[in-house]
Each structure stands twice: as C-alpha cells, then as structure tokens.
Amino acid sequence: MEAKISNFFESVGNFFTGGDQIPLCDGDVVAGCEREVAEAEKGSSDEFRSECIMRLSWALVHSRRPEDVQRGIAMLEASLDGINSPLEMRERIYLLAVGYYRSGDYSRSRQLVERCLEMAPDWRQAITLKKAIEDRIKKDGVIGIGIAATAVGLLAGGLAAALSRKK
C-alpha cells in the first residue's frame, strides 16, 4: 500500500514538473564534446570525426539550453543525407526525435520515433521516448482543458455578477 501511495505522489509530481526519463547534460559536457570535435578536425580519421560529431549531437539535443538543442537538431538534419548504415540512420533519427521532444515539437518527435520503431520495434529507448511524448501530449491537453474551463468559469462568474448588479 505504501508503494502505491509513493507511486501516486511521484506521478502527481511528475505531472506538474514535466518529469520524464530523458537525460539532460550540462554546458561543460557540450563544451568537452566541442573540443573533441575541434581536435578531431585536425587530421583524425573520418570514422573518429564522425563519432565525435555524434557525441556532440547527443550532448546538444540533451542540453538544458534551448539554443543548444536547436543547434543539435540542425546538425543532425544536415548529417542525414550521407548515411548508408541503417543503424546510424536509426540513431540519428532517434536523436532528432529527442531534440524535437526537448524543443516542444511533440508531433514531429512522435513521427520520428515511430520511424525508429518501424526499423527496430523492440528498441527500449524509442519505446520510452514514445511514452514520454504521449504523456506530454496528454498533459498539455489536460492543462489546455483546465485553462479553457477556468476561462469559461470566469466568464460565467463575471456575467452572473454583472446581471446581479443590474437587478
């Protein structure tokens, strides 16, 4: 019983704080990845450079700063054209889905994560992201309904007050 109560309060807390399972990273991680990419540009192999860019893209879309997330989305979109490996394509599409989720574009994020699940239906990260997207869409819908109901209530109360003053 105690575990159920704890889960209830955790879910209520997550509802209001927007808690999800998507990890975040700080600016120092992004800065470290940027240094790594800069060093890789100085004559490293294409494979190593690509790995460094992938780590930077991951850090950017998981960043706490919205401008980093947008930069990560742009980097990933620009890198999709030259990908031949289905695994690399899936990973980049997944990171794009994370980026769009973090930037608030839930419909685009859901489209991308569904593409990932078409490629790998049992991929746990994509399944977790899809659930987080759907939970966020539901939460936003509930909040929207609450705001609309409050507005209607205030309007009705204002009309009732105005009518009672006229009598």
Image (spheres, helix red, strand yellow):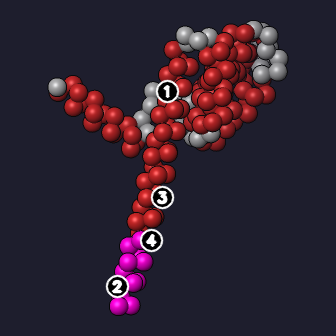
Residue 158, percent from left and from top: 41, 76
- How many residues crowd mark 2 within 10 Å: few (<14), some (14–19), many (20+)? few
Comparing 65 with 39, the one in front is 65
* Circle 2 SS class: helix
| Numbered tag placed on residue 155 in the rendering | 4
Q: Nearer the viewer, mark 3 or mark 2?
A: 2
Q: Nearer the viewer, mark 3 or mark 1?
A: 3
Does any portion of residue 49 appear in the rendered image?
yes
Residue 75, percent from left and from top: 73, 29
- Residue 132 shown left or right of residue 31 in the figure: left
Q: CA distance from mark 3 to mark 2?
A: 24 Å
Residue 99, percent from left and from top: 62, 32
Q: CA distance from mark 2 to mark 4?
A: 14 Å
Over which residues does the magenta segment extend?
A: 155-167
Q: CA distance from mark 1 to mark 2?
A: 49 Å
- How many residues crowd mark 4 within 10 Å: few (<14), some (14–19), many (20+)? few
Circle nearer the N terminus (1, 4): 1
Say which residue appears at 68% left-offset and 9% top-offset: 87
Image height of 3 relative to 65, above or below = above
Q: What residue would you read off at disc 3? A: 148
Q: Nearer the viewer, mark 1 or mark 2?
A: 2
* Circle 3 SS class: helix
Q: What residue would you read off at disc 2? A: 164
Q: What residue would you read off at disc 1? A: 131
- Whether label 1 touches label 2, CB < 8 Å: no
* Circle 1 SS class: helix
- Residue 21 shown left or right of residue 5 in the figure: right
- How many residues crowd mark 1 within 10 Å: few (<14), some (14–19), many (20+)? some
